[in-house]
Amino acid sequence: MASALKNLSAYNDTDVPNAEEMTFGLVVAEWNTHITHALYEGCYNTLVKHGAKPENIYTMQVPGSFELTAGARILNGQQNVDAVICLGCVIKGETSHDEYINQAVAIGLTNLGLTTGKPHIFGLITTNNEQQALDRAGGKHGNKGVESAITAIRMAFLKKTPIKGKEKRAIGF
């Protein structure tokens, strides 16, 4: 769904599992700092709001969005986390560099998730211009960092919760 049709910060907080026993890694791109730091604030505050202990949130900064996957791999090697959230911002420019970066991050995070067995959350804003990025970093479309935190909590919960037999499970949270 296009973020223009949904507020990225809107969710039912009664459906979010308690994150008190969970650990998280946050990898934040320094490029477009005014946007990525807003994503980080939204993400971090949402994790804490839902019970994550500050001492169980490990943060690493990397130079740009392309380096998010390498940063996530390094963080995985240094900390035993339940989920890794990668936050960055790629704004389309005059060349097609944005397509290469966005695709590399998407494929890289998918591969890390599959090889480590841990959720790696795609918190990358991919926009046509700076205003669209600002709108998704706490502006009129909410904050992608908040959405990424909720996704990480839910995915970490799923990983920790064994599926039991053939009983029917409720759909949704």
Image (spheres, rainbow, N blue to C red):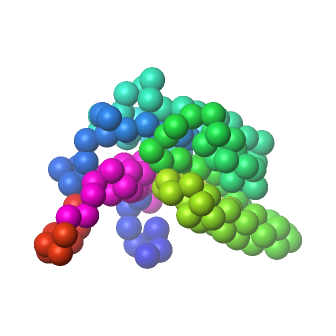
In percent of width and height, residue 38 lies at 54, 41
For the record, the magenta segment spans 141-164
In percent of width and height, residue 48 lies at 36, 33
The residue drawn where x is 64% and y is 51% is: 88
Is 62 situated above or below 91? Answer: above
Is 5 situated above or below 67? Answer: below
Is 113 a magenta residue?
no
Within the image, what quadrant is residue 173 found in? bottom left
Identity of the residue furthest to the right in this view: 95
The residue drawn where x is 43% and y is 76% is: 1
Q: How many marks?
A: 0
Label the magenta part by its dominant secondary structure: helix
Within the image, what quadrant is residue 123 found in? bottom right
Which residue is nearer to you in this view: 8 or 57? 57
**Position of 95 compared to 92: left or right?**
right
Residue 140 appears in view: no
Is 77 situated above or below 1? Answer: above
**Position of 71 compared to 118: left or right?**
right
In percent of width and height, residue 140 lies at 44, 56
Residue 26 appears in view: yes
